[in-house]
Image: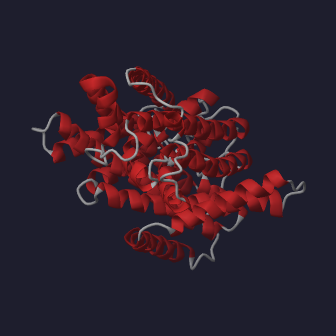
Amino acid sequence: MSTTAPRLRRSLRLWDLVFMGIIIVQPTAPMPLFGVVHQEARGHVVTTVMIAMVAMLFTAISYGRMAAAYPSAGSAYTYVGSELHPALGYLTGWSMLLDYVLNPLICTVWSSKAAMNILPWIPYPAWAIFFALLFTGLNLRNIKATARTNEALAAGMMAVVVWMLAATVRFMNSLPSLDAGVFLRPFYDPNTFSVGAVSTGTSLAVLTYIGFDAISTLSEEVENPRRNILLGTVITCLLTGLLAAVEVYAGQLVWPFGETLPDIDTAYVHIAGRAGGLWLFHAVNLTLLVATIGSGSGAQLAGARLLYGMGRDNALPRRIFGAIDARSGVPRNNVLITGGIALVGAFLLSYQRGAELLNFGAFIGFMGVNLSALTRYWIRGDRRRLSHLLPPLFGFLICLYIWLSLPLPSKIGGFAWLLLGLGYGAWTTGGFRRDRVRFEAPPE
């Protein structure tokens, strides 16, 4: 009789990863942000999205390279702990929990409020319970079933995006003769362009890509992870950026800068209504709700894997966090824990505050991964190339700038979370002197 403990199953192919990454990030990711970026960047939404894509591609390359070196479910936690110091890896993992655990929380909040716009007679608490249970139920299934669900969600959302683009073409054709400048102004309008405004807009547009790193947490469930994690991460980031640029370009054509938007937060829904009428208005509204469900479910999937990596390495109690359900092959305890946090947090945190805390943890992880890649491939590497220096260096500096630009309340809350994790880690390891954390390399 075998006594081998259950492990995560390698069943995902490259395009399974890409579909998962696109769903977690959301094919409609720039739509909720459109109004705010449109206002802050003074109409240069396409420009900010493209600049942000270049910035996040640097970090995506670092993630892919580190996943090739450490094909582990721990992701940034494992990379930093193995390359820099176990204590720094632990703190990185603890920080990233804010990203992965708060993402399903804020998705529960947003989905509940969006659903109330459709069925207002059902109260918020009922919707919050429903969506927290939905995310948890989706992630208690085996990983292959989750991949199939993501492919169906991606197809449905892309159909609505294509509808929006077709409506935009029809809308533009219905207008009187237009000069070429109309089609170039979304990229550059000399009357409104400002470096400061575009920089501010870019710091917001980066949110379009938050979640691409979740692919690396699936390293132990991927066929040929040393190749596919790098390709999957970069392809996801690139496709997200190109799709986002097309979406916001269409939005800017339909609603040029200078015209007052009815509502900043739901601006893109109103743009869809102008381009395609009431049916498209409701279709985009519903699609954003479905996209948020996919994003919240995917973030919970990744958060459960991060907790599993930390539990298996004994950074968190192994019996609870390092266990795999033998039947489904998923870390069931972690799925239930993250689902419980999403449910309770939906009654305690606002969407905005949760999103700010999420970014605090996410960018600590991004900086850590870039430093790990710089250390492994440039500082300690046998063959030093500019390609080993520039992506992680630029990625670190850009992420540091964005992290320092976060609002003060999010910094206070984030540092409080860090101090809590530091205290727990110091208490369980005798001031980080005992070798409690062991970074395991799973078999391929």
For the point 48% across and 71% down, which residue is it?
418
Residue 90 higher or lower than 22, as above or below: below
Of residues 279 and 153, the one nearer the viewer is 279
Quadrant for the C terminus, please.
Answer: top right
**Residue 436 x/y as whole percent:** 60, 67
Residue 438 visible? The answer is no
For the point 76% across and 56% down, which residue is it?
390
Q: Judge from the rendering whether residue 75 lies leftward or rightward of residue 343; answer left or right.
A: right
For the point 46% across and 29% down, which residue is it?
178
Examine the image and state in which quarter residue 408 appears.
Answer: bottom left
Q: Judge from the rendering whether residue 251 lies leftward or rightward of residue 271; answer left or right.
A: right
For the point 62% across and 68% down, which residue is it?
88
Residue most extreme to the bottom? 431
Of residues 391 and 131, the one nearer the viewer is 391
Examine the image and state in which quarter residue 374 appears.
Answer: bottom right
Of residues 200 and 378, the one nearer the viewer is 200
**Residue 360 x/y as whole percent:** 47, 63
Residue 216 higher or lower than 327, as above or below: below
Quadrant for the N terminus, please.
Answer: top right
Of residues 147 and 54, the one nearer the viewer is 54
Q: Judge from the rendering whether residue 32 lies leftward or rightward of residue 425; answer left or right.
A: left
Residue 163 higher or lower than 218, as above or below: above
